[in-house]
Image (cartoon, rainbow, N blue to C red):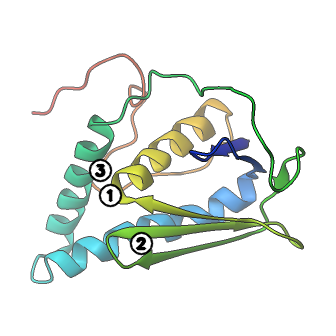
């Protein structure tokens, strides 16, 4: 899967994500977001934390606009025009409510992305949807947010 990242100054980096990398990345991504909830409400039980995480996720992606296509414009490619295959990934929490997502090839330069929590949730949703559409057959569940066929589609979901 090709992951294209553009910066505000017309720079673009293209990264190939493999099913193997996504499979390794996913539990770490879920754990990173789960740990934040555990820090916010340390006295809550596991089920309550899952529910809060699901609500935070739905609130974050509910504000995102997934209907807009990726804007292509003249770009500069600081790492070269050819995409690199991500072989190493690092995720960390940074100060000021930011997350670091570092994607690097086996050798050479990669990219370090600083994401807000809503951006991280949005990226998680897009990654999950893209893997499903690519038929990678990966179990990419998310606490408090059941994976359904309707997720990411135009159909509305009803909460009972």
Percent from the top left, x then y, of residue 40? 17, 76
Mark toward the viewer: 2 or 1: 2
Q: Residue placed at 83% from the left, 66% from the top?
A: 105
Indicate the secondary structure of the residue bearing disc 1: loop
Residue 57: give its label.
3
Q: Residue placed at 39% from the left, 54% from the top?
A: 142
Q: Residue placed at 23% from the left, 53% from the top?
A: 56
Report the front residue among 91 and 77: 77
- Residue at mark 3 to residue at mark 1: CA–CA distance: 9 Å
Can you tell which quarter of the image residue 152 is in? top left
Report the front residue among 130 and 68: 68
Indicate the secondary structure of the residue bearing disc 3: helix
Residue 32: give its label.
2
Seen in the picture, residue 11 relative to 90 is either above or below; the reply is above
Give whichever of discs 2 and 1 has the lower sequence position.
2
Task: Say left or right for 125 vs 42.
Answer: right
Report the front residue among 95 and 66: 95
Percent from the top left, x then y, of residue 127? 56, 44
- Residue at mark 2 to residue at mark 3: CA–CA distance: 13 Å
Query: Mark 3 packing: few (<14 Cα in 10 Å), some, or many (20+)?
Result: many
Task: Say left or right for 111 vs 154.
Answer: right
Name the residue tied to disc 1. Answer: 143
Seen in the picture, residue 78 relative to 112 is either above or below; the reply is above
Percent from the top left, x then y, of residue 111? 69, 63
Query: Mark 2 packing: few (<14 Cα in 10 Å), some, or many (20+)?
Result: some
Task: Say left or right for 54 vs 95.
Answer: left
Q: Residue placed at 60% from the left, 47% from the top?
A: 7
- Residue at mark 2 to residue at mark 1: CA–CA distance: 12 Å
Can you tell which quarter of the image residue 131 is in? top right
């Amino acid at each position: 899967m090709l992951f294209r990242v553009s910066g505000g100054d017309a720079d673009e980096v293209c990264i190939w994500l493999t099913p193997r990398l996504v499979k390794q990345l996913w539990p770490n991504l879920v754990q990173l977001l789960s740990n934040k909830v555990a820090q916010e409400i340390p006295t809550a039980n596991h089920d309550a934390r899952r529910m809060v995480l699901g609500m935070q996720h739905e609130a974050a992606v509910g504000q995102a606009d997934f209907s807009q296509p990726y804007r292509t414009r003249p770009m500069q490619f600081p790492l070269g025009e050819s995409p690199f295959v991500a072989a190493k990934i690092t995720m960390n929490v940074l100060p000021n409510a930011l997350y670091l997502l570092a994607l690097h090839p086996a050798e050479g330069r990669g990219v370090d992305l600083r994401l807000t929590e809503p951006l991280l949730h949005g990226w998680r949703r897009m990654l999950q949807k893209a893997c499903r559409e690519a038929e990678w057959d990966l179990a990419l569940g998310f606490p408090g947010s059941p994976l359904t066929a309707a997720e990411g589609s135009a159909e509305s979901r009803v909460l009972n």
